[in-house]
Amino acid sequence: MKRLCLIGLLAGLALAGAPAMAQTTLRIGLAEDPDVLDPTLARTYVGRIVFASLCDKLFDIDEQLNIVPQLALSQETSEDGKTVTIKLRSGVKFHDGSIMDAEAVKASLERHMSMQGSFRRPELAAVDKVVVVDPSTVHLQLKAPFSPLIAQLADRAGMILSPKAIKEEADKFGLKPVCAGPFKFVERVQQDRIVLERFADYWNAANVHVDRIVFRPIVESTVRLANLKSGSLDLIERALATDLKEIKADPKLKLATQIQLGYQGITLNLANGEAGKNGPFGKDARVRQALEAAIDRKALSDVVFNGEYLPGNQWVSPKNAYYQQKYPLPGRDVAKAKKLLADAGVATPVSVDFMVPNNPESRQAAEVIQAMAQEAGFDMKIRVTEFATSLNEAEQGRFQAFLIGWSGRIDPDGNSYIFFKCNAPQNNGHFCNKDVDQWLDDARQVNKLEERKAIYEKIADKFLKEGSIIYLYHSLVIIAHSNKLEGYRQLPDGLVRVVGVKLKP
Amino acid sequence: MAVSDALAVELGEESLGARAWRRLTKRKGAVLGLLIIAVFVAVAILAPMLAPYDPIRQSWSSIRKPPSIEHWFGTDESGRDLFSRVIFGARASLLAGVVSISIALSLGVPLGLLAGYGGKWTDALISRITDAMLACPFLILAIALAAFLGPSLQNAMIAIGLTATPIFVRLTRGQVLSVKVEDYVEAARAVGNPPTRIALKHILPNILPALIVQATISVATAIIAEASLSFLGLGQQPPAPSWGSMLNTAQRFLTNAPWMAVWPGLAIFLVVLSFNMVGDGLRDALDPKER
Amino acid sequence: MLLFLAKRLLQLLPTLFFVSLIIFSLQQLLPGDPALAMAGEERDPAVLEQIRKQYRLDQPLYVQYVYWVGGVLTGNLGESMRLKEPVLTLIAQKFPVTLQLALMAIVISLLIGVGAGVISAVKKDTPVDYAVNLFALWGISTPNFWLGIMLIFLFAVYLGWLPASGYVGPLEDFWLSLKTTILPAFVLGNSFAAVLMRHTRSAMLQAMASDYVRTARAKGLAERSVVLKHAMRNALTPVVTLGALELGTLLSGAVLTEQVFSIPGFGKLIVDSVFNRDYAVVQGVTLVTATTYILLNLLADIAYVLINPRLRS
């Protein structure tokens, strides 16, 4: 009898232990191959998706874009706005076992600010010094008040790296990254896969239910979806809007969507190079307004994206707290467009060199815009240009209209400053207005939402009428995943957060 | 029959061209190929008259409709009539095939003649450069050239033409080398003809058959190359239709609107197949060993 | 023979020199600033300047060329700007993949092409012959990327027999590796199969009508042995050279096929690097594939001369 009991007990234990032995692997399909996995040097959107599981940041965001704690517990800005006190979480370990403390944070931030080739430098340009107060408190001394700073620390600039790894690997850190995220780096085969495995000492390990993550870059969206449908992948990013119907109809698949942080629009060349100075948009703001009036944003979304994308007319989406209600979405008005052109005294048809990036959705959107604008008297000559060339053309001003978007940042400053300020790096249209410049800097000095929004209203008043960008729509972050995945929630930044997600066998 | 044929040739009553034509038309595959090509050429030329709709006119209420009486091939992602677009697309594809190979011929044949007949160092130089070009992956060169020149149908044709040139250089050179030692060439030289005259008047006509065969087959390859470049976004610019870019767009809609992919794919296939069949037929017809 | 070999090896050097020139001129051809391309969204001018300096992009082209050639001769093909990995490492990672695909494609095309060619020759002018001919023509008339997408939908989505994309190495999981590579290998191989089929057919027809085969028949040998032993052997000799050349072409990377099937081979690497203006990678990989092609070419010529004694003089 006793023996039977023992056997029964052993069998019971074995059975209880059995499910725990099976490893859960989450296979994620990316739309591109990420660049180098070094938060200081990285610059792709898709790289951020990998970082979301690999490298924790000082802060994170929630669905309403509020700042929430991650590696840091709290932040406080001084009265004069020039000192930011950050309190760190205790008991946080890096993947190599070392402890995260204020010294580690200082080392990481300084690396972001000063390493050769660092793309985070402009993001942290406002920081003068990083001071260690005690092992769990850091002071950031700023050169001038800078309210978007915390938003930067909720992105790559706030990712804390293991000081030991920084010292040993130096600029080869990206080949074997060591951070403090829920998963640690196992291996990477370029253009094939990136493998991460669960980090047992993660500060929030109790909420991590997946053992391994495998990222596979698959460029063709049809093939990516085919992989999801056939079960070779568990989750894919950037599914196409035109595939939504099919995904919804498939009982084995689920959708997680959010309006993106950024926007898609047309950048107009107002004064950059010959094409700008002699172009249609530089001389009279009414030509720009005419083009905007000719476009039916809703129809654009309907035709190209099955109505799934959100039409927009500002650099933040209508759902964003900073959206100016005073300037709502205008409808299409061809008569008004024709009148504006007539008033401006330009001969129709107005010829426009229309540069378009080389992807199917942009091409179709360009064709639709061309057809719409034609009715108002514009002849948009579509010129499909591949990515690298288009960046150059945009910089040199060799375009008159450029269909380009921006992936978006949490803070409205990130969607406006570098595009509106005179001579700013991304201001390819060469819009330049001294008042707007001043207001942009003012908005950085103030912290409260209402105050900043009031300043942005003044900017909107100027820019939406005379600026160099016509905002068209905000795309949908579309994540499709197998119904075996439970508890997945999507945030507007498009990142895939694996903490809290369960994968059924 | 065979005897009278031979006699006719012996008596000089039938030129090389006529004999080739007769032999060509005997082969069913080649005849079919010629017919199909002729149909497509006619379609391309008469496109404005044949197409029921304007190929770039969008209709946002009839997006991605399946084939019906109003739209024989269905509509595409912006509501444009696919039948009209396929018809107009024939222009881009046929033009791409013919123009690019014409470029390759006009550059490759003279270079090949020069290499075969020029002299040791000219030959060495041209041959090594040709070898080098053939060693580099064709599509990469085409992509680089197309990117450099700027994406457009003309530039795609130039890019394909330039990358196809080495094949003709090598072929011409090979042919020249084997024909160079023939009696009639030796005779012409002995009489004192200048090299250019010999090359143009004596050598070129005799290597023409091989060139024609290769050209026909290369047109087929060029059409697929144009489709590939368009697939990568480097060919015909929107909204003008081209079968390759239509296939590129159709990829996204394979499950929603498969008809968008069927027709341009079928068109490419038929045209390329026809050129291959004609090329095959020509090769057999111009082969001196055949009767 | 040795003289022939020596002459050909000597020709190799100027060819490689021209290859390097062509490869390097790609850099000049491709418009766009690689530093900008690399920076993407983050475009701080100071950082861009520093990147240009680091990769010598601010130097004149001939200076860069000299540095590059110097590097190549010492075994250093540079570093990928985008991925920060040495080009040689990337090549070492991708070469086995492309090689596996190329070899499988050749095997498939041999099986299909030679098999179909033999059958078609033996059953000349029957419906079987026409059907096989049509198949061969179909093979060279369909765009690769197109065929690939159709096959993915048929075998992966509707039938679910094979994975839709991706690659697994044979050492990791042999059967899965076969499953991931069979579709792209077929797509790559079907055009060469067509070429082989036509070639085998005509060579077989020639051989079957030739004197020594007629003699064999007259001697009373079974038809099958006549066909298999005598005709095929003759038909297959040039296949070796054709195969070597095709292998060289395939090793250059099947650009579009790898794109469609997401196979991390040379083709995909080159295309991505061209679009990202990652010159070091483009130059390094093109150099390796071009050299391989030239060497295979040479091997093919040697094999041809060896097999065909009449050419030795």
Image: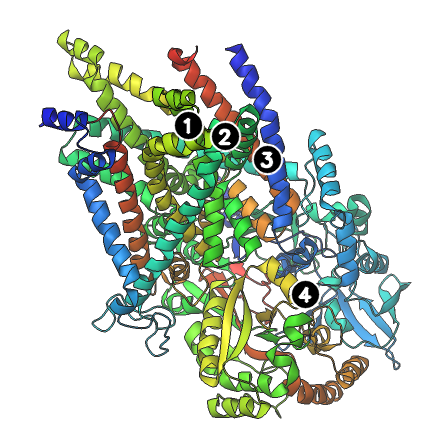
For discs 1 and 4, the disc positioned in front in the rendered view:
1
Marks 2/1 same chain: yes
Marks 1/4 same chain: no
Mark 4 and mark 3: Cα distance apart in space: 32 Å
Taking depth in this image into account, of B270 and A455 the one nearest to the observer is B270
Q: Residue at x 48, y 50 (%)?
A: B158
Query: Residue A299, can we see it?
Result: yes
| C224 to the left or right of C239 | left
* Residue bearing the label numbered 3: C19
Circle number at residue B176: 1
Badge 1, how many Cα within 10 Å: few under 14, some, many 20+? Answer: many
Mark 4 and mark 2: Cα distance apart in space: 43 Å
For discs 3 and 2, the disc positioned in front in the rendered view:
2
Badge 4, how many Cα within 10 Å: few under 14, some, many 20+? Answer: some
What is the chain identity of the residue bearing mark 1? Answer: B
Report which quarter residue C6 is drawn in: top right
User: Percent from the top left, x then y, of residue C288?
Assistant: 58, 34
Q: Which amino acid is tagged 4?
A: Gln
Mark 3 and mark 2: Cα distance apart in space: 19 Å
